[in-house]
Amino acid sequence: MAYKITSKCISCKLCLSACPTGAIKIVDGLHWIDPNLCTNCDGTAYSVPQCAAGCPTCDGCIKERGDYWESWFATYNKLVTKLTKKEEYWDNWFNFYSQKFSEQIQKHQTSGIEA
Ligand code: SF4
Ligand code: SF4
């Protein structure tokens, strides 16, 4: 979700030069963030969004609220990508699980013989 400028903006223009992607523009006299250019400052030298960090108002520049399911699927896809990139993950999981399972069966059978 991109950042957006709200009605609390006092048009100080500080964010215009602070934005590393040139996403902030003035349209019809109002500051506006182009959502196609805003990267939330990810992949830049900055660890925090520069527009919000430098804004002299409390909430003149805020993160746009995302759709619940859109964020849910974004998180889900990120996690699944991480899992599927580790090719041996499921093999290791299966080996560990089957080993524990056979240990349990063996233990059960041994205790049955002794009884
Ligand atoms: S979050 Fe970063 S990239 Fe997006 S508008 Fe603000 S300064 Fe620009
Ligand atoms: S820094 Fe804040 S108050 Fe200044 S122009 Fe940008 S959004 Fe508006």
Image (cartoon, rainbow, N blue to C red):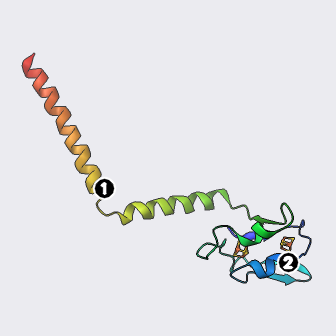
Position of 76 with respect to 101 (left or right) is: right
The answer to whether 84 is drawn above or below residue 34 in the figure is above
From the viewer's side, name the closer residue of 2 and 12: 12
- Name the residue located 90 percent from the left edge and 67 percent from the top edge: 7
Q: Secondary structure at mark 2?
A: strand
Position of 51 with respect to 40 (left or right) is: right
At which x and y percent is residue 55? 82, 68
Question: Which residue sits furthest left?
Answer: 113
The answer to whether 107 is drawn above or below residue 15 in the figure is above
At which x and y percent is residue 97? 26, 44
From the viewer's side, name the closer residue of 107 and 69: 107
- Name the residue located 58 percent from the left edge and 57 percent from the top edge: 72
The amino acid beneath tag 1 is Trp
Query: Mark 2 = which residue?
Result: 31
Residues packed near mark 1 inside 10 Å, few (<14), some (14 to 19) or many (20 plus): few
Position of 36 with respect to 58 (left or right) is: left
Quarter of the rendering containing residue 3: bottom right
Ligand 1: image quarter: bottom right
Residues packed near mark 2 inside 10 Å, few (<14), some (14 to 19) or many (20 plus): many
Q: Does mark 2's beta carbon lie closer than 8 Å to ligand 2?
A: yes
Q: Which quadrant does the C terminus fall into?
A: top left
Q: Which quadrant does the N terminus fall into?
A: bottom right
The amino acid beneath tag 2 is His
| Lower sequence index among marks 2 and 1 | 2
At which x and y percent is residue 76? 51, 58
Query: Mark 1 = which residue?
Result: 90
The span from disc 2 to disc 1 (Cα, nearest Å) is 49 Å
Q: State the mark number for residue 53.
A: none
From the viewer's side, name the closer residue of 102 and 9: 9
Please state the total of marks drawn on the protein image: 2
- Name the residue located 84 percent from the left edge and 60 percent from the top edge: 58
